Amino acid sequence: MAAFLHAARVAAIAALMLLAACGGDSVEDQVRETISAMESAAEEGQLIGFMSHVADDFEGRDGQMQREDFLRFMTLQINRHSRVGAQVFPITVTNDGGNFATATFKVLVTGGRGLLPEDGQVYDVETTWIRDGGDWLLWRADWQPIGR
C-alpha cells in the first residue's frame, strides 16, 4: 500500500510539473494583460510605464507616426488633463503565429481637470503586437474616432 501511495504521489507531482511546463498564459491572455497594463499606466499618468510597452520601431496612423511622435502625443494627452480615463472593450486578439499578434478593440478616452470628465471620445483601434523576449510590445496601431 505504501508503495502504491508513493507511486501515486510521484505521478501527481509529475502531472503538475507537466502542466506547469505546458501551461502559462496564452498569447491572447498575454496581449490582453499588456493592454490592461497600458490602460492603467495612462490613467495613472505614468508615461514611462505606458511607453515601456511600445516597440522602438513603432508605427501608427498608417505609418505617419513613429515612436517619438507617439510619445509626444501621449505626453500632450496626459498633460492636457489632470485626469485621463480609458475604458477598453471588448478586446479581440488573434495569434498571428510566431512573434506576432493582432488586437482590435474600442476604447473610450475621457479627460478633465476635476472629478468628472470634461470631454471624451470612443475610438476603433487596430493594433499589431510583437514578442520581444517574454514581453509583447505594441508595434503598429491605428485608431479612428467613432461618431465625429
Image (cartoon, grey):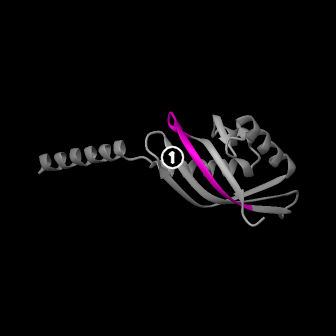
Q: Which residues are magenta?
A: 122-136
Type of residue at label 1?
Answer: Ala
Dividing the picture into quarters, in which one does residue 63 lie? top right
- Is residue 67 found inside the magenta-colored segment of the image? no
Residue at left offset 58%, top offset 56%: 104
Residue at (71% x, 37% y) in the render: 66
Using the rendered view, name the quadrant where residue 17 is placed.
top left
User: Which residue is at the front of the view, 48 or 72?
Assistant: 72
| Residue found 65% across the figure and 37% down from its top | 58
In the rendering, at what x and y percent does residue 46 appear?
74, 43
| Residue 103 x %, y % | 56, 52
> Which percent across, then down, holds residue 73?
78, 44
Secondary structure, mark 1, is: strand
Local packing at callout 1 (Cα closer than 10 Å; few below 14, some 14-19, many 20+) is many
Counting labels gives 1
User: In front: 95, or 85?
Assistant: 95
Describe residue 75's horizontal placement relative to residue 19 as left or right.
Answer: right
**In the drawing, does residue 84 fall left or right of residue 93?**
right
Q: Residue at x 35, y 42 (%)?
A: 21
Q: Quadrant of the C terminus?
A: bottom right
Q: Does the magenta stretch mainly form a helix, a strand or a loop?
A: strand
The answer to whether 43 is drawn above or below residue 138 in the figure is below
Q: Which residue is mark 1?
A: 101
Q: Nearer the viewer, residue 68 or 41?
A: 68
Say whether residue 134 is magenta.
yes
